Amino acid sequence: MRTVASRVVYENPWLTVREDRIERGDGSPGLYSVIEKPDFALVIPMDNEGFHLVEQYRYPVRARTWEFPSGAFPAGVTGSPEELAAAELCEETGFTAGRMEWLGRVQVANAMTAEGCHVFLATDLSPGEPNREHTEQDMRQQWFSRSEVEGMLRDGLIADGPSLAAYLLLTLRTQ
């Protein structure tokens, strides 16, 4: 498959939507809409055989959702995935981690974006005050036991794809 033409059809500070005209191996034409977004980090804050989750309103699904803390660097800020994970953990929960372990990278929605999610396990947590962005003003944080989190996953109370994938990576790590 080769790209014949590419053009930006929409852009804002958080993402770019690109339309690519392609040619398949047999010569037939095609069209792809591609969302360009930077990778983000997701942190599993594990403490006392349980986890700290955050809950916030997610406009696209019109609901408050529980998930593991996650996010990307603001425009113009760069750093390693581990630095990003530490920053998001502190920003959203107030915790700093004595140990941060990389569990893997997952593709978020590889049919429409190359955006990936770097998953980290944070342990040896020290509490502090969250420093949330303005868009996170309704966020709250709560600790749940492992069995509660697994029940929330089973019951669809945690339906965030990256959080589900992260929990799978954690489960595979401990097997």
Image (cartoon, rainbow, N blue to C red):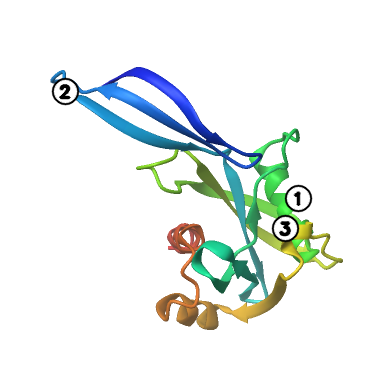
Residue matched to label 3: 89
* Relative horizontal placement of residue 136, taking residue 7 as reference (left or right): right
Q: Foreground residue, 13 or 141?
A: 13
Q: Name the quadrant containing residue 112.
A: top left
Up the image or down, 152 lies above or below 124; here it is below
Q: Determine the residue positioned at 72% across, 54% down.
A: 88
Q: Quadrant of the C terminus?
A: bottom left
Query: Which residue is farthest right?
Result: 129
The amino acid beneath tag 1 is Ala
Classify mark 1: residues with Cα within 10 Å, few (<14), some (14-19) or many (20+).
many
Query: Which residue is farthest left?
Result: 26
Q: Foreground residue, 54 or 102?
A: 54
Circles 2 and 3, Cβ within 8 Å, touching? The answer is no
- Mark nearest the camera among 2 and 1 is 2
* Relative horizontal placement of residue 78, taking residue 144 as reference (left or right): right
Classify mark 2: residues with Cα within 10 Å, few (<14), some (14-19) or many (20+).
few
Up the image or down, 62 lies above or below 17; here it is below
Q: CA distance from mark 3 to mark 1?
A: 6 Å
Circles 3 and 1, Cβ within 8 Å, touching? The answer is yes
The amino acid beneath tag 3 is Leu
Q: Determine the residue positioned at 57% across, 64% down.
A: 59
Q: Secondary structure at mark 1?
A: helix
Q: Earlier in the sequence, mark 2 or mark 1?
A: 2
Residue matched to label 1: 87
Position in image of residue 1 (x %, y %):
26, 22
Q: Determine the residue positioned at 13% across, 20% down.
A: 26
Residue matched to label 2: 28
